[in-house]
Image (cartoon, rainbow, N blue to C red):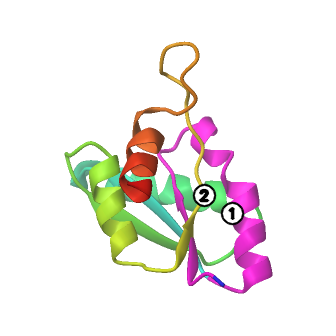
Amino acid sequence: MYSSIIVPLDGSAAAARALPPAVTLAKEAHVPLVAMTVTTPSFASSTTDRIRDQIAAAGMRYPTIELLLSSLPPADPLLAALNRRPGSLLVMTTHGHSHIGQLLGGTAESILRARTG
């Protein structure tokens, strides 16, 4: 079915809402849960700790946390990471910072457009 379940996290409550369904899918499919976050080297340690706590609260132990160290917009390194993990399912939320009526936020929209073509 899937080779892994990927969930992009930025430390926000909105992004963490993707964790319960991502954890459920990973457990049911018996595949690894991979949390990805885009951060800078100076925040890498605190970001990892925060994400590990969010994942533990969602009921998953021993996840893979992939830090994408970049100053680029988050969609670019996330897309590159997805390309390195064929067969993965991406589970994410949107923050909804866009204007009224737009369904997807900047990162989610960029990834969806890039992956669907």
Residue 36 in which image quadrant: bottom left
> 77 above or below 62?
above
> 1 above or below 33?
below
Left or right of 29, for residue 76? left
Helix, strand or loop status at disc 1: helix
> 96 above or below 23?
above
Report, in whole angstroms, how far the alpha carbon at label 1 lies from the one at label 2.
6 Å
Q: Is residue 8 magenta?
A: yes
The residue type indicated by label 2 comes to: Val
Neighbour tally class for label 2: few under 14, some 14-19, many 20 plus, Cα within 10 Å: some
Q: Residue furthest left?
A: 71
In the rendered image, residue 61, in percent from the top left (x then y), is placed at: 68, 75
Helix, strand or loop status at disc 2: loop
The residue shown at (37%, 58%) is: 45
User: 10 and 92: which one is in front?
Assistant: 92
Asked if marks 1 and 2 touch (Cβ < 8 Å), the reply is yes
Could you say which disc has been placed on residue 91 in the image?
A: 2
In the rendered image, residue 53, in percent from the top left (x then y), is placed at: 62, 57
Please name the residue that numbered disc 1 is placed on. Answer: 22
The residue type indicated by label 1 comes to: Ala
Classify the position of the C terminus by image quarter. bottom left
